[in-house]
Amino acid sequence: MSGSVNKVILIGNLGRDPETRRTASGDPVVTFSLATTESWRDKATGERKDRTEWHNVVIFNENLGKIAEQYCKKGAKVYLEGQLQTREYTDKDGNQRKTTEVVLQRFRGELTLLDSRGRGGEEGDFGAPARGGFGRQSPMERAPASGGFGGSGGGMGGRTSDALDDDIPF
């Protein structure tokens, strides 16, 4: 294999409101934590169990940062695509530390809001994608071959569920 891939796709809930800081050159950097939870039923006891992983997210993309600042709040459900990056720093006590973050680069990355306004966690009209990059489009955002997008309602960028059902190959 001649190349490698560093891509992270997460769907989860914000653990805190996004915070914006500025670099020395004045570029915005937006950070927040994202929780992803895996659920299963214990075969021995039948008890439902959960495991939550926390991810630190850093957005260098100015447009995605504005979306996160404006619309994302603690508890909001989002879909994001980025890459893993590990960096070293010195903490306030002088100790060397390492942290691994999910980074949405300046011209790469994707952030899709899955919550609708005022509905607290339900999917709806607020599901339109906010992307970085130049004309990138994921397969889920492309119009089906048999027709265009449906009406103005629903999640998934405004498509009706009928339009999605037509092109599912399984």
Image: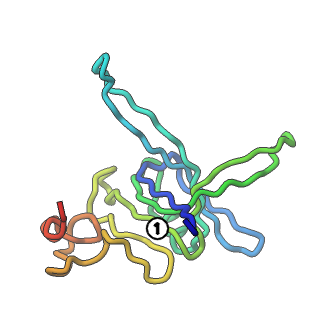
Relative image position of residue 168 (x, y in whole percent): 19, 65
The spot of residue 87 in percent (x, y) is: 72, 54
Q: Quadrant of residue 114?
A: bottom left
- Judged from the image, the secondary structure of the residue bearing numbered disc 1 is strand
User: Considering depth in this image, is 149 or 168 the residue closer to the camera?
Assistant: 168
Q: Residue at x 13, y 69 (%)?
A: 166
Closest to the observer, 153 or 150: 150
Q: How many numbered tags mark residues here?
A: 1
Q: Residue at x 15, y 65 (%)?
A: 165
Most extreme residue toward the right is: 94
Q: Residue at x 17, y 75 (%)?
A: 151
Quadrant for the C terminus in the image: bottom left
Residue at position x 59%, y 61% from top? 103
Question: Left or right: 152 with respect to 91?
Answer: left
Q: Nearer the viewer, residue 91 or 43?
A: 43
Quadrant of the drawing holding the N terminus: bottom right
* Residue 84 point in image, percent of width and height: 59, 57
Q: Seen in the image, is 112 located left or right of residue 157?
A: right
57 versus 139 height, above or below = above
Question: In terms of image quadrants, where is residue 45?
Answer: top left
Q: Residues within 10 Å of mark 1 (few under 14, many from 20)?
A: many
Q: Residue furthest front?
A: 1
Q: How is the image coloured?
A: rainbow
Find disc 1 in the rendering and name its residue: 110
48 sits left or right of 97 in the view: left
Type of amino acid under label 1: Glu
Q: Position of residue 24 (x, y in %)?
A: 77, 70
